[in-house]
Structures are given as structure tokens and as C-alpha cells.
Image: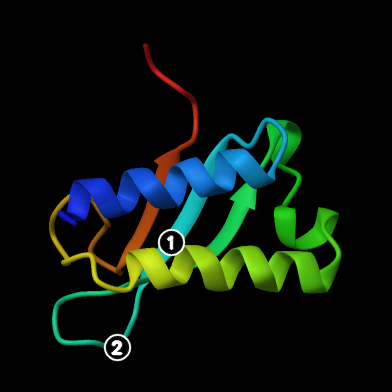
Amino acid sequence: MSDAELLAAALDLIRLQLTNPEQAHFETNDGSYSGFHLNDVTFAGGLSAEQALDLTVWRHLKDAVDDLVIGIAWDGVMHEDDHGYAEVSLEKHP
């Protein structure tokens, strides 16, 4: 899968598991110019998935998403900042 396909699959998985998520928050891992980890998902009003979900449910979702985004290259589809953080909208666009 391409990086764009991996990201799309990760975002679709989050949308499937959570009701009305707004933004996914990622950061780079310590790999050699590739790989991300899901830090959190936020909802309207700033509520965090980490706060809102049962810890087991959150870890399961995080691990499943991480399995997809671990192979995404840096400086590409994630548009991360200079510190390795990326915020990706979960709104569906037509």
C-alpha cells in the first residue's frame, strides 16, 4: 500500500470505531525517516478519546492504527511539523 492508502485506511478505522471524531493526532517514531504513532483522537469540544474510552478499547484502537501508520514516510502525506507532530482531520470530504 502507498502512504496515502495507509493513512486513508487508518483514518477509516478510527471513523469506524468512534462516533464523530474530529481530529487524529500522530507523532513520528524513532525510525529512520519513517513511521508514526497515534497519540490521541479528539472530538468536538476537545474531548480526548484517551479520556473518553475504556483503556482496553483505546489501546486496541491505537495498536490497530499504529500497525498501519508505522510504515508511512516522514515529510509526506502526514504533513507533520518540525517536531514530528501531525494533526489530521477526520471529517469526510465528498
Q: Looking at the picture, which amino acid does disc 2 mark?
A: Asp
- Whether the residues at callouts 1 and 2 have beta carbons within 8 Å, the answer is no
Quadrant housing residue 63 = bottom right
Q: How crowded is mark 1: few (under 14 residues within 10 Å), some or many (20 or more)?
A: many
Say whether residue 26 is left or right of residue 28.
Answer: right
Q: Is mark 2 on a helix, strand or loop?
A: loop
Which residue sits at x=30%, y=69%?
Answer: 83
Residue 64 place in picture, x, y as percent? 53, 67
Which residue sits at x=37%, y=11%?
Answer: 94
The answer to whether residue 48 is above or below residue 74 is above
Say whether residue 3 is left or right of residue 61.
Answer: left
Number of numbered discs: 2
Q: Which mark is residue 30?
A: 2
Which residue sits at x=72%, y=65%?
Answer: 58
| Cα separation between marks 1 and 2 | 13 Å
The answer to whether residue 84 is above or below residue 81 is below
